[in-house]
Amino acid sequence: MNDFLIGAAQVLAPTTLIMMFFGSFAGIIAAAIPGFTVTMAIVLTLPLTFTMEPLQGISLMLSVYVGGYTGGLISAALLGIPGTPSSVATTFDAFPMARKGEPGRALSLGVWASFFGTVISTIVLIFAAPPLAIFAVKLGPWEYFALIVFALTIVASLVGHSLQRGLIAAMIGLAISTVGTDPMMGRPRFDMGFEMLAAGLPFLVVLIGIFAISQLASEVEDVNAIKTGEKLVTGDVEFKTWAVMREVLMRPVNLVRSSLIGVAIGALPGAGGSIANLVAYDQAKRASDTPEAFGTGTPDGVIASEAGNSATAGGGLIPLIALGIPGSAVDAILMASLMVHGISVGPRLIMDNGDLVYGMFIAMAVSSLMMLFICIVSMRAFLRVAEVPKWVVVPIVLVCCVVGSFALNNRVSDLYLLGFIGLFGYALKSLDYPLAPLVLGVILGPIAETNLRRALMTDSDWNLFFTRPVSLMFLIAAALSVAWAVRGILKSRNDQKISKEPV
Amino acid sequence: MPDNKQRQESGDVARLLSYVALLAVSAGLFLEARTIPTSRFEVLGAGAFPILVHGTLIALLLGAIVGSVRKLPTQAYGRFFSHIGQWALSRRLVFVVFGCLAVYLFAMPVIGYPIATFAFLAVLQITFAPKTRKAIAIALVLSVIFSFGLNWLFAEVFNVFLPRGR
């Protein structure tokens, strides 16, 4: 209790709160710009924390972290471009909802879902950190590979009009992930002698090229509309704060399920928000009575994706706090900021620095409240983006994408890759290939390959994938998921046949 | 609506061509993956996963090609070439965007971020904007802010230096 009060006193000090306020704001803005990620915002914040007290510094970084997970939804809803990799699934329903004339509702749903997702993940973090962390790190490469096989079955929910093209797109994504140095032995693959391909295709550049460039190019397809100053989104720019809060709370099962998926995936080292939002969306669609409404602007889709990605913030802290193992790049930076202050991060963290750990829990809760406050107060200003004509937005967002791609590695060759991938993405979009399975393939490819090869390096027996209980559980879940998808496709074909038959 | 059906068929021909192009690339990479030597330290080598991926992709593409060829009438191939011209004309601004983006990306390392971005934004915005003095003035002001202004912000505040040119 004493540690809790000491931690609370430090986090709730006026100077810390002011810094957290600016941190939340900066996180939201950074993530709202396509091409800039939460990780980049945290990296830029790190040097500022060197002169602060450890808890003050970590509170500032947590506020950027929580704000960043929410900010990605702004460009996802208003531009149809995921602001960060963790808001890919948000574009599926928030963007159609905004296009239908409800941009305020789309944003508000996302903000409230993010808030409740963060709160739920903080509660889980407080009560379940040690047992969950021990479970997460006991998973071997067999279990990780089986988990990725299960995650790949999400493709069935993301295929759009054609299962065949969805599967082809997912395979293209996996193929893209094999370009460059092999993840186990460092052997060069498929670089064709080009230096820019030797390091592989950076995930963020692929994401921006595939989603952002292709979406921006689609915005100028209608020559007359753009020349007359058409806006990106037209309609009600009301945020409808309290009505939407009730709407989110009226879907408790979706909210809690998506948040728990986010926590669980966040707790797995190497996974994170970029996978959690897609898995949460997929599970919400499967559990829904109206799965056909997903992708057309249903609130359940927005809630699932945003609660799922925001909950990974708390989930990622579970192995960090309980075992000193960072679950993602952002958690590694948080860990570095503690180590700069001479704090040893490991299983003894909670015993030796109880005030710091309790302070982090409080900082998470305070950050989510600040994010909510900032969004409610300033969302009207963000919604003004929707009123800017396309002829202004398209070129400026293109420049933001270029700057974000360059700032990632300070490599000019990434700019050329961005151009090529953007053109490829536009071609695929024009040919009605779904883009989300491709991005899923790029995310999951390296994790799948690394764990498959690592498992067989440890023991060449393939049977271990089926005899280890957790691995078997994931593989059975994958098989059930495929069976469910096939059943859904057969059912929709039968429905189409019946509706075509003359009455 | 026969016109709609014909357009749909032209789209299917375009998709068929994309399957063939992807098949050619995937088959090439499949063969290259087979030449990647295996390591003595592991059961699977660096080429195993790409072989698995491209093998599956090739099977999917062959299935898609067979399905498309069986579905499409012979006349659809002839109509495709007349429709492609109309399609390109209706999307001329998309080609302007990609053309400007290509010039911008290749010019940036040579002339530097601020000048390249200013020119890119000014040209693209003025091309798209309604031809009024106010719109052109807004376009020029925004071009300055997002070229020279953003360059200053990154250099002075974030210590990230955007390309400065040769």
Image (cartoon, rainbow, N blue to C red):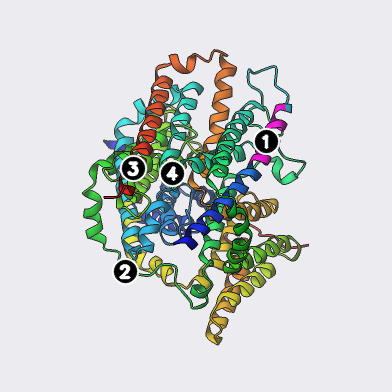
Can the viewer see residue A25 in this picture? no
Residue occupying image coordinates x 67% and y 35%:
B27
Q: CA distance from mark 4 to mark 1?
A: 26 Å
Q: Residues within 10 Å of mark 2 (few under 14, many from 20)?
A: some
Please identify the quadrant where the N terminus of chain A is shown.
top left
**Residue pointed to by mark 1:** B27
Earlier in the chain: of badge 2 and badge 3, it is: 2
> Residue flagged by tag 4: what amino acid is it?
Leu
Q: Secondary structure at mark 4?
A: helix
Is A417 placed above or below A217 here?
Answer: above
Residue A449: percent from the left, percent from the top?
57, 29
The chain that hosts pointer 2 is A
x 44%, y 62%: residue: B1
Query: Which residue position holds label 3?
Result: A285
**Closer-to-camera residue (A142/B33):** B33
Q: Residues within 10 Å of mark 1 (few under 14, many from 20)?
A: some
If you read the primary sequence from the N terminus, does the residue marked by circle 4 or circle 3 appear first?
Answer: 4
**On the image, which quarter does residue A280 sit in?**
top left
